[in-house]
Amino acid sequence: MKMLLRLIRTELRVAFGISVIKYRFTKERKKLWEPILTLLGALIGIGSMMILFSIFAISSFYIFKKSGQPVETLLAVSFLASQFFLLFFGIFHILSAFYFSKDMDFLISLPVKPYQVMGSKFVTIIVNEYIMSIPMVLPSVVVYGIGMGEGIMYWLKALISILLVPVIPLAISSLIVIVLMRFVNIKKSKDLIVVVASFLSMAIGIGVNFYVQKMMNGGMEDYYDMGQIQDWVIKNVGSKFPPSIWVTYGLSKPGMEGWGYFLLFVLISVLLFTFLLWVGNRVFYKGILSGNERSGKKRLASFETASDKYIKVSSPLTALFWKEWKLLLRTPVFMINGLSGMIIMPVMTLISILGQSQESIGNFIKVAREPRNDIYVSLVGFGLMVLAASLNMVSSTAVSREGYTFWISKMIPVSPRKQIISKLLHGMAISTMGILVIGAFVVGLIGVSVLKLLVLIFLSSLASMTIAILDLIIDIFRPKLDWTNPHEAVKTNLNGLFGIIVSMGYMFFMTVFASAMVLFRMPQTVIFLGIFIFEVVVLLPCIIVLFKVAENRYKNIEI
Amino acid sequence: MLIIKDVSKSYNKGAVKAVDGLNLHVRNGEIFGFLGPNGAGKTTTIKMIVGLLNQDSGSITIKGFDNRKQSLEAKKRIGYVPDNPDIYDKLTGLEYLNFMADVYEVPLKERRERIDYYLDIFDLKKAATDIIKSYSHGMKQKIVLTGALVHDPELWILDEPLVGLDPKSAHILKDLMRKHCDKGNSVFFSTHVLEVAERLCDRIGIINRGKLIAIGMVDELKKGENAETLENIFLELTEK
């Protein structure tokens, strides 16, 4: 047990950079702003999620009260949502922490038991997942507790429940993963596994979205229906995953019944965790070691044939640009983060359209095609294009993704300006894919003219360039280079979040500007020209700042 | 070839002096061995030469080019191999080498010849089309070495280049170093293997706690008391 606690402490220190913060605080105060800024960013991100879920909780509470529905539905929905979220998306963290982190080779060699290593990693994942689960659950628990005037015991049980929420779903995901990995040669199929798991999760997310859309359109006209839907969710989905119901009843049922459900929830959490450690002790290392065996992979080609194919002359800029592509496409975590925005956004748009009834789709197209609505449709199409272009973390992690290989960028005789241009072009190439996909939608649905489509593509490309530049400035300013697992370079890199915040700010001001022009009933050509001028006015200083920052940072980032 | 003038570097706001007023001159045609105990400042010095770290004061010039003010010109003349071969592990060996040749703007004929030559002598041809992630430490070391030499730089800066190499590859590298210097070029390398330094280097420098405590030819250094071997000199100087 002592060893397990020691390992947990070390893992947490590594995962959250506690030692680095301590070091900065005591010895390198000059750079203390970095962790402070990171913390601030995290607080903004978590805070905005909390606000969103609080609004949901408060409104749902009053809706249930008003319609005479059982108010505990609110608790059930929150617990169910967060546990489902953890069950599916936790698989990524488990896969990467258990099997793909570089410290595993070192940990295996230590005189510690497999369950201790796995247990420490598991607890670290749980703490990590609190970032998502607490904002989802806490507002409902607080709103319910205050609204119902609950006593001290409720709050005590609530605290324990919130802390235990991730245990059952993550333990189930872990069990699936470690048993599966026992029989799969992970090193050989590693990339495939990550890609399949990612797209599966995406498909589940999209599926749930589609289902909810369909259900909402099935007659959710008033509060009563919403209550019914949630009641339906609990009875049908909750019955297949009872821990959410146990914890809900544990908190809401009075007296012994409530305590019974609560203790059942706690007991099952503890038992499942213990069972996971027991299974892990038997199969965890076997899964990792089987993946370390060298596979007799066929070589791609003979040297002579390959050298003719690969040894070619390109300019440094071209070489850097293609290197960015190769590394992105060959690292599954990078690829998924880079390209999924382009898939999710159009698919979500399509789903929200298909989720409507035939009649309303027909009406929508009819209204959209009316000449007087032309400008609104164009601007919405333009907005969607810019949004699709901004939905990736390619530019906001462009430097971070280099990690320990950043020494090469510092070493090569290519100016920082040229290096950053290669990253900008790469980011824009991906954004352009998003723009074109949405463009195809706009043409397919509304049937805008080719000329207008070209204008929209041009304008959104300019906007996406500014967004990519802003993202690059953020990342070059504080790149996360000390990662051991590609997951850390994108998923736990707050530059992605900062990038989204800045992009949203840019889009907000552009929307205000465009809306003002529409309100003043300016002709369409003038509106497009106005947007173009707005974009250029923002873009030019951004380019200058990017080059300045790149020159400065490439020189001064020390590795 | 390489002139280091009054170079200092400290960490933690000056609390730790990693390199303290270092002065060095590596001449054309010489192999210069840089020795010192762990944490003495060898890697910090090397990283400052190649531009990975910025010196707090002093200057470093490579073939007359200041490595801060004319950094691109200076970099073109260096081939650097770090102590840890962290490179793009999702590229194949050949893709990495062609990338390095592109960024150093090596013409097609020369790059073909050099890549073919180095891969052949390091016995890497068979693995050249595999991704680098599948390489052993030694293979990575050799591919980094090849990448660093593909533009035929005048000055080789090698940080512990022999670590992880098999005896045959280590022998080949030592041979290459000698031949390179015989053509009037220079090699600046750090090592812990004193025998190698003794046999291979034209001159050596010993650094301890950031300060250069000895510099000269091995024979010159041996003239001191109890200095029959380089090991004795090293121990005597660094344990003071």
Image (tube, rainbow, N blue to C red):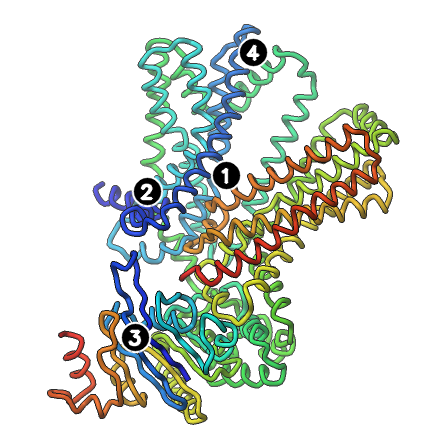
Please report contact status of discs 1 and 4: CB closer than 8 Å, yes or no: no
Name the side, left or right, on which A359 lies relative to A471.
right
Q: Which mark is residue B232?
A: none
Secondary structure under tag 4 reads helix
Where in the figure is residue A516, as x and y percent of width and height?
73, 31
10 Å crowding of disc 1: few (<14), some (14-19), many (20+): many
Q: Inspect the image, locate mark 4, and give the three-letter code of the amino acid beneath it.
A: Ile
Q: Which residue is mark 1?
A: A89
Q: Is residue A392 left or right of residue A292?
A: right
- At 76% from the left and 33% from the top, the residue drawn is A517
Give the residue number, with chain letter if any, for mark 2.
A119
Q: CA distance from mark 2 to mark 3?
A: 49 Å
Q: Nearer the viewer, mark 2 or mark 3?
A: 3
| In front: label 1 or label 4 | 4
Q: CA distance from mark 3 to mark 1?
A: 53 Å
Rendered location of residue A462, percent (x, y): 70, 49
Q: Is the residue A309 above or below the residue A391 in the image?
A: below
